[in-house]
Amino acid sequence: MIEKRITHQLLETGELTLTERESVALTLPAHSSSVVLELDGEAFHAQWSGRGRQLTGDILIERLQDYGQDGGLLRLRKVDDVYRLELLPPGTPIRITQTKPNTLTTKTSRSKAARRRTVDRQFHADTEYDWTANQTIGFLKEARALLGDQLKAAGFDPLEIVELRLQGEELATLDDFEELLAVDVANVDRMPHQEAVARHALSRLRGRAVLADEVGLGKTIEAGLAIKELTLRGLARRVLILCPAPLRDQWREEMQQKFDISFEVAYRGSEVQKQEKLILSLTLGRNVADRLTEKPWDIVIIDEAHRAASAGARKTRDLITSLTTACRYAFFLTATPVQNDLLELYRLIELLRPGTFTSLNEFKRQFMRSYDPRTPDDPAALRRLISSAMIRTTRAQAGVDRVVRRAVDVPVDLGPRERELYTLSTDLLRNVMRDPGDAMRRRSLALRLTASPFSMGTSALRMAERHRDARVRSVLNEVGHFAMDIVGSARENKALEITRNWLREHGRVLIFTQHTDTVTGLLRRMEAEGLKARSFHGAMSAGERATTIAAFRSGDAPIMISTDAGAEGQNLQFCNCVLNFDLPWNPMRIEQRIGRVDRLTQPKDEVFIANLYAQRTIDESVYRLLAEKLRMFELLFGQVTTILGELDDAKSATFEARVLEALFANTDSKMEGLLNQLGAELEQARKSASTLIAADSGLSSWMNSAFEHRKGLSKAGTTELAPEVSERSRRRQRRVQKWTRSVLQALDAELVHDTGAGEGAFLTAQFGEGVCCTIR
């Protein structure tokens, strides 16, 4: 059994991270797998990440937020094949005490005779030795065999196993980066330009590069591939990411979900300790520069690096200089290395690779024009210089704008009982659940306000079972029972109407919602209406998920109802209709939903998106912010991140946190004022981003040809970018396959299946009776 204090971060993320000792105590596997948890008699699946030693899943997140309290106690123990979970209130004492294991020391002694013992030296013929390739060092065969026998008798590994270990270490640390290990293990959609950029940055640019792809091409993924590659090869351990405050949580989620790398986020200076993997804002970084530079980092990532290139950003550049001069690998991410004039490009390149240019005066003399400060006088010469430090891909080269998005807003008019439920629930959140310990419960209920009466009722009743305050418990029960009595919500009716129309016109519909309770309620309604639908969420086992995807692809179940976490990393390009049953209060979640079908391999020219929102509620206010202020449904793929990155770092709260703050205001007028303020900031950020995007386009006009020589990126729209023809040498893969066969044979395993070399190849081996493993 293990015990852990429940923290705010655990409640917010739903990611339960264990120590190595805790995972061993629970006998959790070293590999990633699906496990069964049990809480109060309810069994559900969660995903276990062996590398990150982390448990997560849709239902686990919801139960932690519904039942857990900041400062409470979490107990987890294994009973048979099930992991039983207990969530206890604050003040519960920890029962398990950890003691250091006893260290046994054994004295060894040697006799004087043994220390004086010598071996008579003899001469041997050359043929009695095993010689190295250059014939300079020889090993006496008899002595080598004797040593092998003695080592084996003493419990050491046989010589051939040691040699295989050394070969494996060599394969793991090959520094040519022609083939990326990270590509095979990362949970990312294969976009060839991202792989090409990561490979180019690590090989030709030796791990110090400005990643300057045009807006929306996935520079975060490119940096993540580089981080994963370096950590996999054992070349890096400590990683620091500095980014705009609104993007911190997005970076953490991307690194965890796509690359299985756990980062800590520091929101305050006191939280910057001695973490090995840390994310914080540039603003906070400047304030804690001394702590950040105490010990060198292996990798430093600077997101939106153009912020460090302006004339007034000297303190930021001083911090970055201190960090990057002490680290081996550094990556600057920006789509707009030139916004106002070419001096910004000069500062950025010199910050990463000092000495690239002769001098500032020489740079001005050779490249700058007085009448056009953003376009160089000698573009060919400047391209040659910056190509040693910068990589840039255009949207045309990547082929991301081929599919047109057709978005439609769908207002929902709540019925009288639903409107009464909304009023009752809003009063509960504003005036009843005021204790700081209820913060995550309030958030959980707020996100369900108008989405589904069934989900709202189920969650409220669950909370009522455990809440310690009698008044809160009474109101939660009232809200829960009232919600459960509502049958056939207006939102479900509208979703059914749209789904039927799309099925007739397009064949398949992908429906997204935030909570598994909503998935369950909507699935029941679809089935009651005679529609074939399947649910899909992160708490399902791998087999269940595969079966659902297969049914959705074949058309046996043309409707798939999914949570956000469930569809993470899934390629659903065979569908081109996305119905947002509810809207997350996080613009990036919506972008990720659409991205499940809007991809390079989408066979159709259009993707259809329907967004449901309840009129005259907080739901409509959020939709107006997204559609009118952010204009996210008019943006090209990936441009949302650019806009959010332009929000003021000083207001470090996330979009969702700002909306919750407004909802919890004690009057509607205060709520409206806070939402209007957020809307004004979004509008300003969008205008700033538009300027960046315009500068981005102008930059490509003279810079693009600097990178056209790169293999696979030679022409706009080239077919070399398509995944099916992105061929490259797999020499290292074949060496790994050969090495794997040798290891299995050395372990006396029987090779049951061996498909040979090449892409998709795999080995299946059997150890003894019934124990098999498959290696791809």
Image: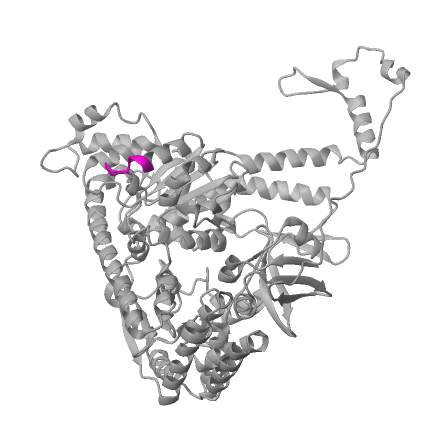
Identify the residue shown where x is 49% and y is 83%: 524
Identify the residue shown where x is 42% and y is 51%: 251
Left or right: where 177 falls relative to 666: right
Identify the residue shown where x is 36% and y is 70%: 663
Instruction: State whether residue 150 is above or below residue 91.
Output: above
62 or 770, which is in the foreground?
Answer: 62
Residue 289 belongs to the span the image colors magenta = no
Q: Quadrant of residue 127?
A: top right
Q: Quadrant of residue 167?
A: top right
Image coordinates of residue 690 in percent, x first then y, are: 21, 53
Residue that extends furthest to the left in the rendered view of this protein: 371
Image coordinates of residue 282 in percent, x first then y, are: 36, 44
| Quarter placement of the N terminus | bottom right
Left or right: where 103 falls relative to 380: right
Q: How is the image coloured?
A: one colour
Image coordinates of residue 696 in percent, x first then y, are: 23, 47
Residue 311 belongs to the span the image colors magenta = yes
Image coordinates of residue 580 in percent, x first then y, are: 37, 72
Tell me which secondary structure the magenta stretch mostly adopts. loop
327 or 289, which is in the foreground?
Answer: 289
Identify the residue shown where x is 9% and y is 36%: 371
401 or 656, which is in the foreground?
Answer: 656
Answer yes or no: is residue 626 visible: no
Left or right: where 751 falls relative to 519: right
Please give the range of residues in magenta: 309-316
Instruction: State whether residue 120 is above or below residue 510.
Output: above
Answer yes or no: is residue 660 visible: yes
Count the marks: how many?
Answer: 0
Instruction: State whether residue 209 is above or below residue 589.
Output: above
